[in-house]
Image: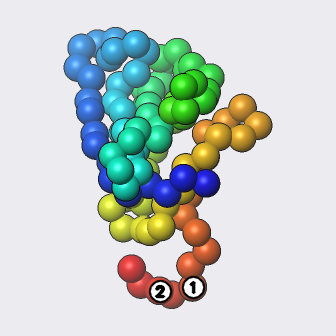
């Protein structure tokens, strides 16, 4: 599972966003290589299927999850991203209970 070392955020304006998306978080490895794009869709927007094309994972989530994903990226480590069974996955490694990060 590739480890996420940095991220950047992009918001799309206009009533329809951009390419059916409202916002995007780009995940990079330690060398700055793009690992994944997590794209967020408002209610009523078309959701594309998750994919792994050219070594870049494209994961789609509801806009309501944007703040939660950003919170994990800001406060947890290590963070991994991978693609399996037709879906993108983003998560942390096992952590002790009550670590209070």
Please, is residue 77 above or below residue 35 in the view?
below
> Height in image: 91 above or below 39?
below
Q: Are marks 1 and 2 in contact (CB under 8 Å)?
A: yes
Q: Is residue 85 left or right of residue 42?
A: right
Element marked by disc 2: loop
Spatial CA distance of label 1 from label 2 is 6 Å
- Say which quarter of the image contains residue 48: top right
- Is residue 70 visible in the rendered structure shown here? no
Q: Report the quarter where the C terminus lies.
A: bottom left
In the image, residue 66 above or below residue 15: below
Going by the picture, which residue comes out furthest to the front?
Answer: 31
Q: Which residue is mark 1?
A: 96
Residue ID at (33%, 61%): 74
Viewer-proximal residue, 63 or 69?
A: 69
Residue at 54 percent of width and 25 percent of height:
54
Residue 40 is situated, as x and y percent measured from the top left of the image, at: 43, 31
Quarter location, residue 20: top left
- x, y (%) of residue 75? 36, 67
- Quadrant in the picture for residue 27: top left
Residue 49 location, x and y as percent? 62, 23
Q: Residues within 10 Å of mark 2 (few under 14, many from 20)?
A: few
Residue 65 rendering spot, x and y as whole percentages: 45, 44
Q: Residues within 10 Å of mark 1 (few under 14, many from 20)?
A: few
The residue furthest right is 85
Q: Secondary structure at mark 1?
A: loop
Determine which residue is flagged by label 2. 99
Q: Is residue 5 visible?
A: yes
- Locate the N terminus and report the quarter of the image it occupies: bottom right
Left of 60 or right of it: where is 39?
Answer: left
* Residue at image location 40% in from the left, 21% down from the top: 21
Q: Which residue lies at the image location 55% right of the left edge and 32% below the top edge?
A: 55
Q: From the viewer's perspective, is 24 left or right of 56?
A: left
């Amino acid at each position: 599972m590739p480890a996420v070392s940095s991220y950047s955020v992009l918001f799309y304006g206009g009533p329809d966003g951009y390419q059916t998306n409202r916002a995007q978080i780009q995940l990079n490895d330690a060398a700055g290589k793009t690992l994944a794009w997590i794209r967020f869709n408002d209610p009523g927007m078309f959701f594309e299927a998750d994919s792994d094309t050219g070594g870049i994972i494209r994961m789609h989530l509801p806009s309501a999850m944007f703040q939660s994903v950003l919170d994990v990226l800001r406060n947890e480590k290590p963070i991994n991203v991978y693609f399996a069974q037709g879906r993108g996955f983003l998560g942390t490694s096992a952590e002790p209970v009550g670590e209070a990060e």
